[in-house]
Amino acid sequence: MDTFGRRHNYLRISLTEKCNLRCTYCMPATGVPTLTPNSKLLSTNEILRLASIFVKECGVEKIRLTGGEPTVRRDLLEIIEGLDKLRSHGLTSIGMTTNGLALKSKLPALKQAGLDHLNISLDTMSPHMFELLTRRRGHQSVVDSIYAALDTGFKSVKLNNVVMNGVNDHEVVDFVELTRNHDLYVRFIEYMPFDGNQWSNKKFVPYKTSLAQINSFFAPTPVFKASDDPNDTSKAYKLDGFKGKFGFITSMSEHFCSTCSRIRLLADGNLKVCLFGNNEVNLRDVLRSSDNVPDEEVIRVIEEAVRRKKKQHAGMENLATMENRPMVLIGG
């Protein structure tokens, strides 16, 4: 728990800095100058040891695997199987966020290994726009992965969509239409500034603009507020008679810092207590400082980092000028 009474029970683990797409809002146009050498990335055993400490000693109940792109990591199934063994110690949820490009064939094995929840990123219905946004081909592969995931039987399948003015904001209603016949949660994410993504206020679309667009398009079908999960980052809505729902992650226009329950373990072992903060502490170095580092030392470092967490982020305009990692090096 931090000094503002926030209990941190949700750990996001970035498994890799590598990705098979080059999304404009995530990776600088010039690429990431230097990826962390493999020797300085967390190993399978280190990831599982830290996850065990977070669950058994720090009260973490939910873990989400991110990247980079987590499916490019060869030991992904081994990691999920290891996390699954922590359920008897209080872990209730294992999720993963993926671009879906190489996901479809892996779905049965992922579910069998213990994966509960799946978030898939897709920002456009247009194959051409997909290539412009991701700098790669593969739109149909992602679409196929979404429908296959819905048929695989995960506890939840969510679709993440970063809304950008003049780019894909006109497609919001098309994505909401997906919820008519599918038990899918489409989440529209406000465009956020990170190093190298050329964030601009002109590209920013506040969620209320998108919500008004949806209300207008689907009228007279009523849009009503759906129940939000405790400490959820999204504001959930539902159209009357639709099977799924949609929501908004409003990090910029209406931040949710007061209820934040998240901490992030990056692929290089750094612990990041705020997505927009640049204060990090390296748990990899703690683990490798001697042959038999006791759990108590790791816990001490974690607790000190959490206690330093600020009350809220610096605000939209200030965030745009602050130094931070590119999103690909943090994890979605």
Image: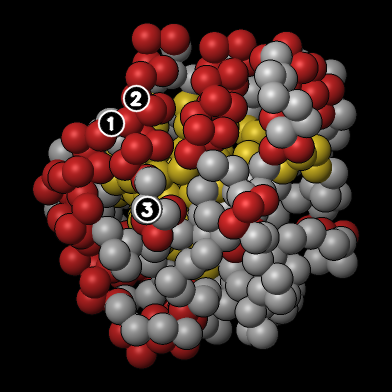
Q: Residue at x 12, y 48 (%)?
A: 151
Q: Nearer the viewer, mark 1 or mark 3?
A: 3
Mark 3: amino acid: Arg
Instruction: Say which label, 3 or 2, has the lower sequence index.
Output: 3
Observer-nearest of 42 and 209? 42
Report how far apart the C-alphas of labels 3 and 2 lie in the structure.
18 Å
Mark 1 sits on what residue? Answer: 114
Mark 3 sits on what residue? Answer: 74
- Where residue 84 is drawn, which disc sits there? 2
Residue density around tag 2, few if under 14, some if 14–19, many if 20 or more, within 10 Å: some
Specify the quadrant of the image occupied by residue 104: bottom left
Report how far apart the C-alphas of labels 1 and 3 lie in the structure.
16 Å
Judge left or right: residue 326 versus residue 184: right
Observer-nearest of 145 and 129? 145
Mark 1: amino acid: Gly
Q: Could you say whether the residue bearing mark 3 is in a helix, strand or loop?
A: loop
Q: Are marks 1 and 2 in contact (CB under 8 Å)?
A: yes
Mark 2: amino acid: Asp
Residue 119 horizontal/vertical position (percent): 38, 49
Observer-nearest of 304 and 1? 304
Specify the quadrant of the image occupied by residue 154: top left
Position above or below: 203 against 105: below
Residue density around tag 1, few if under 14, some if 14–19, many if 20 or more, within 10 Å: many
Q: Residue at x 59, y 27 (%)?
A: 50
